[in-house]
Amino acid sequence: MERYIAVDNVCAWPNLTQLPNGDIVAAIFNQPAHGRWEGDVDCWASSDGGRLWSYRGTAARHDPGNNRMNVAAGLCPDGSLLVIASGWDNRPSPPKTPEEKAEVERKNVFAINLPSLIYRSTDGGADWTVIGQFDQHDLDGPNKKYWIPFSDIITLADGRLAFAAYSANRKGVRILFSEDNGKTWSIPVSIVDSDQYHNETAIISLGGTTILAAVRCEEKRILELYRSEDSGKTWSYQIPLTLRGQMPGHILKLQDGALLLTYGIRNKPFCGIGARISIDGGNSWGEPVFLVNFENVADCGYPSSVQTDDGTIVTAYYCKNIPTHNRYHMGVTCWRPEEFSTR
């Protein structure tokens, strides 16, 4: 197992996409804060299996007074990269001193979430073009808020693209579909509606008409598994995936057909990244393993994983102020399933 500080001084919340040539591209928030000030969605790339990373381009640039930070990202069938990014208004410019930073982070400034813009790159993440806007909202009237993107953008067996979004108004989680390589998107379809706040959700297509969703239940503070057998039209609750304090997550289909779930763990003193594997399409899951140890630092998590041609799994995450690195950063671990008892 190898572990790296991949991108320093960013809060990140990485979303990884593997390109046809093997490069790995991470779409990240490029500021060392939880969206409190202006910032963009940058793309960093690795051409050596996740060990060395370099800046490649900026997918979603902010306008003065706001940021772009909430991301869905993935690969289109034509090989182009797609990023869907929303953010928040009423954001100051980045603070210049530790005192200014502390003051900005202390204030609870009211902000309205922005409609998402849709960005496409045809050169591996270097240059980006806005190709549309996703501006659907969850309520009518003055309290409307736009759906917030969060997931991989996946390709279904019928060729459509799909991603998951959640409501800032606590109105549940939806899945959206595109038939034109991401330029336009369908009316959101419900994955879960509940009085319990559900938000950041990972989705995976198992082929055919089956889709799984690992949904963050904020009030229980766990991940819950939902399944659709009709290409996302209807959904049913399956099982809890994690213990309390363990979320959000990511699901990856491995080369041997198994499913890998990775997720953040915020159970002091055991904070880090956890992993579980399913060999039966998500019906049951192996014992959890402690993949990365953050040494009691709970400001951490949001993993995203890809698997390289040689079978190595590259898992990216964010963390703040571990004892050996006293800044926000995007970290990466490169590992193999046989190193752990995950099945």
Image (tube, rainbow, N blue to C red):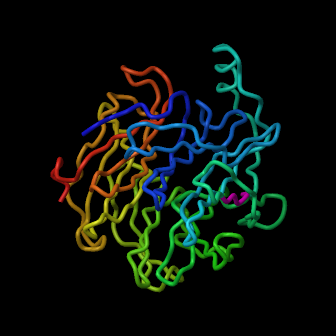
- The foreground one among 25 and 113 is 25
Question: Where is residue 329 shown, x and y percent of the image?
Answer: 49, 31
Quadrant in which residue 185 is drawn = bottom right
Question: Where is residue 90 shown, x and y percent of the image?
Answer: 79, 38
Screen quadrant of the N terminus: top left
239 shown above or below 307: below
- The foreground one among 160 and 237 is 160
Which residue sits at x=36%, y=42%? 265
Which residue sits at x=73%, y=64%? 134
- The foreground one among 246 and 85 is 85
Q: What secondary structure do most residues of the magenta stretch adopt?
A: strand
309 on left or right of 139: left
What's the magenta region? 116-120
21 on left or right of 12: left
Which residue sits at x=52%, y=47%? 26
- The foreground one among 273 and 158 is 158
193 shown above or below 297: below
